Amino acid sequence: MEVVQSQRKSSSNNVIVSILPLYRSAPPLEVRLEDFEFFAIDRLRVLKGLSDGLCRGKKPEEMEKLVLDLWKANMRHPQAVEEVNKDIISHFVLRLVYCRTEELRKWFLSMETTLFRHRFRWGSSEAQRALMSEFKLPYKAVSNAEFESLKDKLGQVARSMGQTLAAADAIFYKVPFEEVPDLVAGRRVFIHKGHAYVAINQVVSLVVTQFRSYLSKALILTNRKWTSTIREQEKDRLTPIVEALCTSYLGPDYSQQQEFGEISIKDIDQVAKTSFPLCMRHLFEKVKEDHHLKHGGRMQLGLFLKGVGLKLDDALAFWKAEFAPKVSAERFDKEYAYNIRHNYGREGKRTDYTPYSCQKIISVTPGIGDHHGCPYRHFSEENLRAALVRMGVSSRAVEDVMDKVHNRHYQLACTLTFEAVHGSSCDAGINHPNQYFIDSQRVLQSKNGSVA
């Protein structure tokens, strides 16, 4: 797969017949640089949506619909050949992105394996058997005679799962039981003399095991190529894209507040109590308490306030008033006002800076005396519990939040906090502090008939 800046070439040799690629080798395609990134971002939306669904404990039937909807929304293409090419290209780009650390490899392996499992189920029996043959699985279907001798036992297992055993089209594979641990653990197979009898509608477990094993090894090999040659060779072109993709925020930038208009200084204390996420509420309380914030805190809170609709003049007035007990007006104008105007695109390169996403906030490392960052990641457990209680989160909800924190699902912890505070579900999950604010205002508006 060669990445070029000209248009991508394709030929009849690039037509891939298999509906579900096995990603064994990079496609012989030239890929435009913008497609290299855009295709990867589209697939990343699928994987992150899948991850969020799993972390929220969605039921199997809910996950099935979620994955299908995510795939249709992000990976479909009017031309079947181009859809397959996009599928393969995006996988190999993300394989490069997520091969670089053990933690990244673990997440990518888990999500791609889960996606493969769902997509395998979408195929027909013929397509599934074709994939089994591609993996060269050494399993043969149980003979009719053996099936008849075990039919009653197999039927009992089927009935225990609420299914029926249709003898006319029943196909079973006899495999060593240790190769299907998920089926054994779920008591979904009949085991006899060290072998599990796997129904055709369960062969996904066999195929997924093979896929996971192959992809795990491929990620290690990709990492070796990345560190030995690719990273240095592509340092001016692909490397910056690859290194940024794993922390890419994929939602709106919230640089301008459009839905609820502007907020003024007189409103800010009230909306901070009702609609600020914990990360911004903490910073807001600290600037009120200490009359100062270090640069990281000023950037995180300042851009958030810009995104929720605080005008430049009001922002200057807010920071100046809060800093007044410790910073003179002259010093403020000299040392702080420029950076505020800069964030609003009125100084320097005139860049209109955007508020920080959850991923960016989670990834920072606050130093001593800093108050920015993500409370769910950076607070001690004692401080986080106290902060949640001050927000009005119930004891039971606090335990649910802490469970997510212990498992490092920080955005889900914030989502559960939102739901506990507002008494309203947030199915999309919280991905941005400004999204939290907007969703909060929507809930309050629907409850009160006006924005709090």
Image (tube, rainbow, N blue to C red):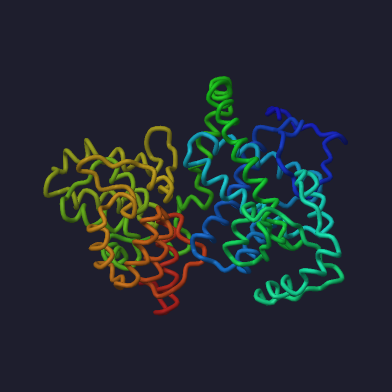
Farthest-out residue, bottom:
448
Compare residues 248 and 137 and report the one nearer the observer.
Answer: 137
Query: Residue 276, image x and y in percent?
Result: 34, 61
Query: Residue 315, image x and y in percent?
Result: 30, 51
Q: Residue at x 75, y 41 (%)?
A: 85
Image quadrant occupied by the N terminus: top right
The quarter holding residue 148 reads bottom right
Q: Is residue 258 left or right of residue 213?
A: left
The quarter holding residue 93 reads top right
Let me know if residue 73 appears in the view.
no
Compare residues 332 and 193 and report the one nearer the observer.
Answer: 193
Q: Is residue 402 above or below residue 226?
A: below
The quarter holding residue 182 reads bottom right
Query: Residue 327, image x and y in percent?
Result: 14, 43
Q: Residue at x 40, y 75 (%)?
A: 423
Q: Residue at x 36, y 63 (%)?
A: 401
Q: Residue at x 38, y 47 (%)?
A: 362
Query: Residue 174, image x and y in percent?
Result: 74, 57
Farthest-out residue, front:
193
